[in-house]
Amino acid sequence: MAQSPQPPSPADNNAPGETARSDAPARKKVLVVGATGFLGAKILRTLALDESSAVVAMSRKGAPLEGGAGIEWVRGDMIDPASLDRALQGVDVASLQPTWLPGHRKAAGAFGSRCLTRLV
């Protein structure tokens, strides 16, 4: 009994030895520190609309009741190194907009040593 032909797969159009590649660009993982604050919340709302960004929001309070669809929330504090390490896992870009209090300048310097693509 004859089998019906299979539809061509994207890999069929590649040169021998090549595999199919996605044309979609990789999403940058962006951390917004102070995401529940005045400026952080505005930045977070804007980034949430950007399809090229995977957004991580960090707040000492944690996620608000309406945390926003597609936003990953982490509880953390800029002056707590362990919470910074958790929040920065896999992050490409970090946006900092803290109120400058004692200890925050040192914490901001710690972000620069975490191999980020960009610090805003």
Image (spheres, helix red, strand yellow):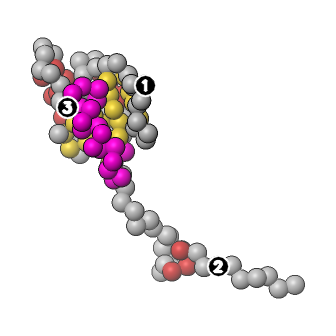
The circle on residue 65 is: 1
Q: Which amino acid does label 1 sit on?
A: Leu
> At 29% across and 44% down in the image, what residue appears?
47
The circle on residue 39 is: 3
Is residue 38 in the magenta section? Answer: yes
Foreground: disc 3 or disc 2: 3
Instruction: Tell me the SS state at disc 1.
Output: loop
Residue 54 in the image, given as x and y percentages of width and height? 37, 45
How far is mark 1 from mark 3, CA to CA? 19 Å
- Is residue 79 shown left or right of residue 90? left
Depth check: 41 or 110 in front? Answer: 41
> At 39% across and 25% down in the image, what residue appears?
64
Sequence-wise first label, 1 or 3: 3
User: Bounds of the magenta span?
Assistant: 35-54
How far is mark 2 from mark 1, CA to CA? 47 Å
For disc 2, the marked residue is: 7
The circle on residue 81 is: none
Q: Residue furthest bottom?
A: 2
Q: What residue type is labelled 2?
A: Pro
Residue 32 in the image, given as x and y percentages of width and height? 27, 34
Q: Which amino acid does label 3 sit on?
A: Leu
Question: Badge 1 local density, few (<14 within 10 Å), some, or many (20+)?
Answer: few
Question: Badge 2 local density, few (<14 within 10 Å), some, or many (20+)?
Answer: few
